[in-house]
Image (cartoon, grey):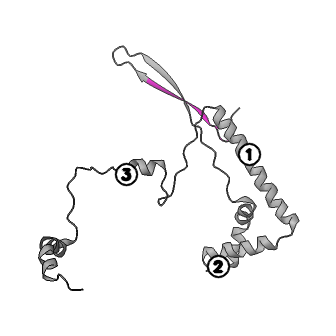
Amino acid sequence: QATSAQAIRVHATAASDRGSGGLYFFPSLTMAIEQPKKITGGAFGRFLSEKRGELMKELSGKPASAVVKLASERFKALPEAGRAEYEEKYSQAVEQYNKDLEAFKAAGGEMKAIAKRKGQKGEDGAAKKAKKDPDAPKKPAGGAFGRFLAKHRAEFQEQTKGQP
């Protein structure tokens, strides 16, 4: 019995043996199992996804941030019974995710690492950075004036000896 997270398809290929004209049948079973998507957003996320259409019509021409702000205000104004409804929807979604995840793992699926955003560095980011060669020649610092100053520093120190 396949769940929503599982899809099994049988792919059969046929090839002919050009020499004898015989037909060979190569069945290959490929499992197309997808990792279930993690539930995010909580009760407010459920409320927002349900009401977003109405709020966008109400605030047509306004930025998306205004829609989220109005949704936040309305969600806070909901009575406890209204909030409980969205909490229940969220908990049902989490339960379904857990069931799908168990079915995914039971079918031999492996969890993929969560893709990190550009600014975040993890173990991979540190490992990918090339290590500096300690024997590499040093880049001259300071540009043309810095090189000039480094070359003539001793002269300038003698000329200005005793001056503040």
Element assignment for label 2: loop
Residue lying at 64% horizontally and 79% vertically, measured from the top left = 60
For marks 1 and 3, the one nearer the N-term is 1
Identify the mark at residue 37; answer none if there is no mark.
Answer: none
Name the main secondary structure of what is drawn in magenta. strand
Residue lying at 68% horizontally and 36% vertically, measured from the top left = 103
| Amino acid type for the residue under numbered disc 2 | Ser
Indicate left or right for 117 with 15 as reference: right
How far across and how far down the image is residue 74, in percent? Answer: 77, 74
How far across and how far down the image is residue 109, in percent? Answer: 59, 35
Q: Residues within 10 Å of mark 1 (few under 14, many from 20)?
A: some
Q: Please give the residue where the numbered disc 3 appears in the rendered image.
A: 129
Question: What separation in Å lies between label 2 and label 1 (alpha carbons)?
Answer: 35 Å
Residue lying at 81% horizontally and 74% vertically, measured from the top left = 77
Seen in the picture, residue 160 relative to 10 is either above or below; the reply is: below
| Amino acid type for the residue under numbered disc 1 | Gln
Q: Please give the residue where the numbered disc 1 appears in the rendered image.
A: 96
Which span of residues is magenta-colored? 4-14
Seen in the picture, residue 133 relative to 149 is either above or below; the reply is: above
Element assignment for label 1: helix
Question: What separation in Å lies between label 1 and label 3 (alpha carbons)?
Answer: 40 Å
User: The C terminus is located in which quarter?
Assistant: bottom left
- Let me know if residue 74 appears in the view: yes
User: The N terminus is located in which quarter?
Assistant: top right
Q: Please give the residue where the numbered disc 2 appears in the rendered image.
A: 60
Tell me if label 2 and label 1 are in contact, CB under 8 Å. Answer: no
For marks 2 and 3, the one nearer the N-term is 2
Indicate left or right for 90 with 81 as reference: left
| Amino acid type for the residue under numbered disc 3 | Lys
- Let me know if residue 56 appears in the view: no
